[in-house]
Amino acid sequence: MTDTLQTRSVLTVLDRLFAAAAVEDEAPSPWPAARSYADASAQERADVLEGVLMPISARGGTLLYTLVRAARPETVVEFGTSFGISTIYLAAAVTDNGVGHVLSTELSEVKIAAARANLVEAGVADAVTILPGDALTTLAEVPGPIGLVLLDGWKDLCLPVLRLLEDRLAPGAVVVADDTALASMGEYLDYVRDPANGYASVDYPVEDGMEISCRTGFRHLSGKFPAPGESATTYNAWRGRHPHPRTRTRHHRPASSRPRATAAAGRTSPVLGCRRRQTRSSTIPVLTAGDRMSTSPPEDLEESLQTPPPRRSRLQLRRPTVRPQRPARRR
């Protein structure tokens, strides 16, 4: 079994990028003090921070690799390529799975060129397609079903990107959000941690925090996802009117799906749904094919099923012996 993550080419690129990120953490931020980060557009942030790696942690990258290997998604979407550190983990996983492709999006042209070069050096470029431009535009045309999503771009855009992809998420899709310890991720965390929005979510303790969410959703029951702010009470009310097929009782089955009588040794009871053994001591009447097509069993059948036949002794159950009569002897 191949392990692309442990190959020399992948380890060389990751070690170099993590070493550069460690030096970067000790340097002052390149963001101008006179400019407001919150008021800047996504393109302005990308232009100012085009030389900053902003990587995922090594432990978080290993978690990503593990999740992709376990889920085996056919389509992986990454919001925020940067220099391609997290993309290498995703690409190594789909390469080892032998199935799947990574679609990543990045706004900075400088980072796109650097990420593509790193993917080629690591030997996993064939498993990745980088979509240049605004993620809210480039990801709008990504076909589903999407099996795994990594949200590692601008934090105030993580929730809009997730909402953009929701109608194409596969049942049980995994959504991973990085840097959840930042205050700007509060709205996103409130959304995925609310069961009414169709997610089961848990915090994973890595550097700067990581949220792992599973798309439970209501698509398999109601055919739609809940609207923003729709409470669980609304969903439960709908569930009461439309029970899941697996929770329906026997009486919900149409008459055509009920078991039919067979010509073999025994017939099928329309009430019990199982074959009944026919004995000479049984008082239960045998139904014909015409009787079985009725929507309700006859009254005498219900009474006979509720009242067990009387017990008989062995002598009563024995078949009477019939002896042939001998002709009288002539004297």
Image: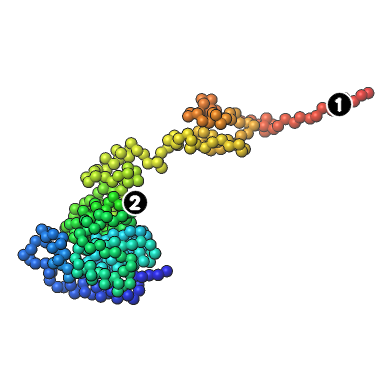
**Label 1, label 2: how far apart the Cα atoms are:** 85 Å
* Residue beneath the point at 29% across and 41% down: 235
* Image location of residue 274, percent across then percent down: 53, 38
81 vs 257, left or right, is left
Residue 63 showing in the rendered view? no
Number of residues whose C-alpha sits closer than 10 Å to that of mark 2, classed few (under 14), some (14–19) or many (20 or more) = some
* Image location of residue 34, percent across then percent down: 6, 65
153 vs 72, left or right, is left
User: What is the residue that sits farthest to the right in this orientation?
Assistant: 331
Residue kind at label 2, given as amino acid type:
Pro
Q: Earlier in the sequence, mark 1 or mark 2?
A: 2
SS state under label 2: strand
SS state under label 1: loop
The quadrant of the image that shows the C terminus is top right
Task: Say if 184 sits above or below 57 in the image.
Answer: above
Q: Which mark is residue 327?
A: 1
Residue kind at label 1, given as amino acid type:
Pro
Foreground mark, 1 or 2, reads: 2
* Residue beneath the point at 51% across and 26% down: 298
* Residue beneath the point at 61% across and 34% down: 278
The picture quadrant where one finds residue 86 is bottom left
286 vs 129, left or right, is right
Residue 291 showing in the rendered view? yes
The quadrant of the image that shows the N terminus is bottom left
Residue at numbered disc 2: 171
